[in-house]
Amino acid sequence: MLIGMKISWWILWLATPLLAIDWVKDPVAFHVTGEAIELTGEGGLGARTAEEYEDLRLTFDYRLAQWAEAAVVVRAPRYGRPLRAGVAITLAHDFHKQITNYVTGALTGRRPPLTAMPMAFEKWQHVELTLRGTKLRVEIDGVTVQDTTVESGLVRGHVLFANLGHRYAVRKVKVEDLGRPTKLVPLFTKLGEQRGGGKFRLVDGVVVGENGHGILFDGPRVKDLDLTLYVRPHNRVNAGVFLRGAANEKQPRGFEVQIYSPPDAVYPTGSVYGMARSVIAQDYEEKWFLLRIRLVGTRCEVWVDGDAVASTDRLADGTSVLGQVGLQIHSDAAWVEFAQMQMLVLDPPPAL
């Protein structure tokens, strides 16, 4: 089985000798010509930075081929659907001559631009984008196209020039890191405490659960949180993420957000087990996807690859229970991978 997320890096120098940006190598999706990154419209997600950013200022020039559709995404996830889970700005030829959520300067799929940009291709255009917390401002060729607040599934993520099946180029890329004010708590940097059976291993930062029935717990005991992690299921594994639980079998094990690939299952991936069925429409077998869980009081909300798939207000004792995060394996002859698990604690525990 394929385990882990080993990545090859290369250094691309742009703009000035003082600026070095590491891009994840994908020679099919993009290549370098002089000082420009040429997106081919083929291959993977596009040209993605190795580094993750929270608050940032991004500047670059772009040039579209005729009829091209493109996008730049900040706080982009490593896998899945970055234009849904990250903060995306559309860059397009705009030959349809309509103002929609999918024209140049639009917050992709969410909000049209403040000002309609003229139709353009085969010319260099300049973008300045600043994101601080939820505050987003974007200018194209000196024209303000977004000045708004946003929500993204990730507190921090990559910069991505997305592959939407068309050719385009970018140059003079500069990323200014404006800081990481949000205090995220990393989880499962080492194996925690196990409840029940099954086998858990830590391989290159990825937790692998396989062959059995048990839950691995880690992290501080909290009540309310916003949790993100990547998941990859194998061999129709039945697994899950537990919240407000404990490894000690004399204490509650918590409640479960389900991981089970078939979208037509009774409780498919993203379901709050026994309380709210997920509305996922695709099978995530053998695919990495981004899972986000927000838990406040009696309410639990779940997103898969940036799409809201389940929610409930029926959590028992949701205003008082403290517990840890747990990773479950609930299958024989199957396995699941969990990676880059981190949470924002929404209720700091009381001082001892």
Image (cartoon, rainbow, N blue to C red):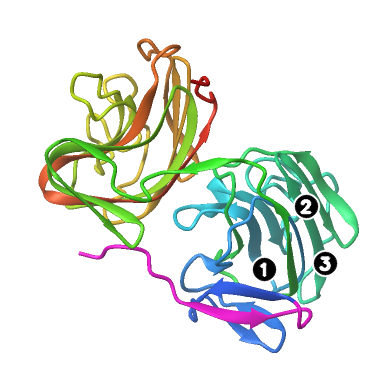
The residue nearer to you, when weighing 152 against 282, is 152
In the picture, the disc for residue 130 is: 2
Q: Secondary structure at mark 3?
A: strand
Report the quarter where the N terminus lies: bottom left
Q: Are marks 3 and 2 in contact (CB under 8 Å)?
A: no
Q: Quadrant of residue 275?
A: top left
Measured Cα–Cα span from mark 3 to mark 2: 14 Å
Q: Secondary structure at mark 2?
A: strand
Where residue 37 appears, as percent x and y from the top left, is 65, 79
Mark-to-mark CA distance, 1 and 2: 27 Å
Q: Amino acid at mark 2?
A: Thr
Q: Is residue 75 left or right of residue 141?
A: left
The region drawn magenta spans 1-18
**Which circle marks residue 126 in the picture?**
3
Q: Residue at x 58, y 67 (%)?
A: 49
Instruction: Say if the magenta span includes residue 70.
Output: no
Picture residue at 30% right of the left edge, 24% below the top: 255
Q: Amino acid at mark 3?
A: His
